[in-house]
Image: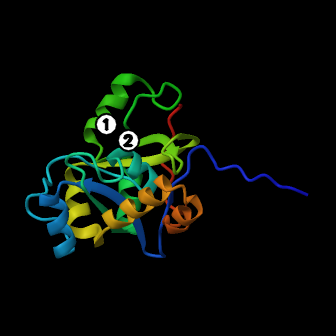
């Protein structure tokens, strides 16, 4: 008997261990290369600005064009303390007003201004970077959350630009099975569930 497994529409999926979760970001070389070299974000990384982290490798590839877009040439895999990420999710607000979730728009705006993190659900991507019917988490970190991310929660930083280029090259050569074998294994993560938005 065939049992069809359906991916939940809203679910946090990531490469993870018992104590860490891997998220992705892309930066210009002036930020990305020192971050890899030092294992932490350099002083030039703006701790007072919102930064967005993405646990989906393929969504990151969609966003940065496999590391080819200007200002996103260095793709980083940032291993983050799971407890820190859980804290950010617990205190996060949705990035968009949703009538069925929020009391009213004014209340949502006040909550958004005060929240140290923002949740956004975007369509997950396949290897061709086409939209899938289920969503992938983006988490925006600001203020206290951004500072903690950079200076407390970051466990390691790896340059995965070569991986991005290798996978992209294999796909262009129509070696899809080999490309798929190289993708990070992303499975559901047991973290506080942020509230979903409607499509």
- When the figure is inspected, residue 152 is found, relative to residue 4, above or below; the finding is below
Query: How many marks on residues?
Result: 2
Q: Which disc is residue 142 wearing?
A: none
**Helix, strand or loop at mark 1:** helix
**Pick the front one: 45 or 101:** 45
Q: Is residue 40 visible?
A: yes
- When the figure is inspected, residue 183 is found, relative to residue 197, above or below; the finding is below
Other-residue count near label 1 (Cα within 10 Å), few / some / many at <14 / 14–19 / ≥20 = some
Residue at (19%, 48%) from the top-left corner?
71
Residue at (55%, 62%) from the top-left corner?
180
- Residue 85 in picture, x, y percent from top left: 38, 61
Residue most toward the left?
A: 43
Q: Earlier in the sequence, mark 2 or mark 1?
A: 2
- Residue 166 in picture, x, y percent from top left: 40, 64
Residue at (32%, 48%) from the top-left corner?
64
- When the figure is inspected, residue 187 is found, relative to residue 194, above or below; the finding is below
Residue at (42%, 67%) from the top-left corner?
21
Residue that numbered label 2 is attached to? 93
Q: Is residue 188 visible?
A: no
Separation of disc 2 and disc 1 at Cα?
6 Å
Residue that numbered label 1 is attached to? 112
């Amino acid at each position: 008997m065939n049992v069809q497994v359906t991916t939940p529409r809203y679910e946090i999926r990531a490469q993870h261990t018992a104590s860490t979760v891997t998220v992705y970001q892309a930066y210009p070389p002036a930020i990305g290369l020192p971050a890899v070299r030092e294992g932490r974000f350099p002083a030039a990384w703006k701790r007072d600005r919102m930064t967005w982290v993405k646990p989906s490798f393929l969504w990151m590839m969609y966003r940065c064009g496999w590391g080819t877009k200007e200002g996103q040439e260095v793709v980083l895999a940032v291993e983050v303390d799971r407890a820190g990420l859980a804290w950010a999710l617990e205190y996060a607000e949705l990035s968009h007003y949703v009538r069925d979730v929020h009391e009213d728009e004014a209340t949502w705006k006040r909550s958004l201004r005060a929240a140290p993190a923002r949740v956004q659900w975007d369509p997950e991507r396949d290897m061709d970077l086409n939209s899938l019917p289920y969503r992938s988490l983006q988490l925006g970190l600001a203020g206290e959350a951004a500072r903690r991310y950079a200076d407390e929660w970051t466990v390691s930083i790896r340059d995965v630009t070569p991986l991005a280029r290798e996978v992209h090259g294999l796909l262009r050569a129509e070696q899809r099975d080999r490309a798929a074998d190289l993708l990070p294994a992303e499975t559901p993560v047991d973290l506080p569930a942020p509230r979903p938005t409607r499509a």
